[in-house]
Image: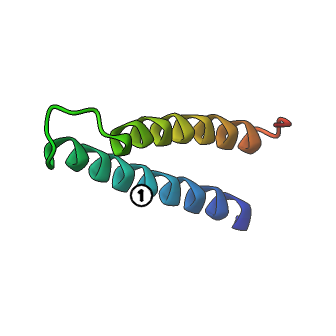
Amino acid sequence: MKNIIKKQEDKVIFYICLIVAIAVGATSFFLPPTGVIDPSCLKFIALMLGFAALGIVGKNLSLGKEV
């Protein structure tokens, strides 16, 4: 039972961090300078790719596969 609760806590923490990262990244597109690809926007895209990788790694670990 503790293992199931731990898996659920990991998912909740992952989704909270993902939502916060999306919110911060979305606001960076609307703050000045608008219309310019700022390095912070590029970091946001890299962060989203990192979250995608973490999502796949977490799913594989929960299924008992090696990463």
Measured from the top left, where is residue 18 in percent x and y? 42, 49
Coloring scheme used = rainbow
Kindly identify the residue that appears in the image at 44 percent across and 56 percent down.
17
- Corner quadrant of residue 33: top left
* Closer-to-camera residue (38/25): 38
**Residue kind at label 1, given as amino acid type:** Ile
Measured from the top left, where is residue 66 in percent x and y? 86, 37
* Closer-to-camera residue (28/6): 28
Residue at the right extreme of this rendering: 66
Quadrant where the C terminus sits is top right
Q: Is residue 19 left or right of residue 27?
A: right
Q: Is residue 15 left or right of residue 37?
A: right
Disc 1 packing (10 Å; few <14; some 14–19; many ≥20): few
Kindly identify the residue that appears in the image at 44 percent across and 42 percent down.
43
Kindly identify the residue that appears in the image at 37 percent across and 41 percent down.
39
Using the image, determine if residue 15 lies above or below residue 56.
Answer: below
- Corner quadrant of residue 4: bottom right
Residue at the bottom extreme of this rendering: 2
Per the image, the residue denoted by label 1 is: 16
Measured from the top left, where is residue 35 in percent x and y? 15, 31
Quadrant where the N terminus sits is bottom right
Kindly identify the residue that appears in the image at 72 percent across and 44 percent down.
62
Q: Secondary structure at mark 1?
A: helix
Measured from the top left, where is residue 24 in percent x and y? 30, 53
Q: How many marks?
A: 1
- Corner quadrant of residue 60: top right
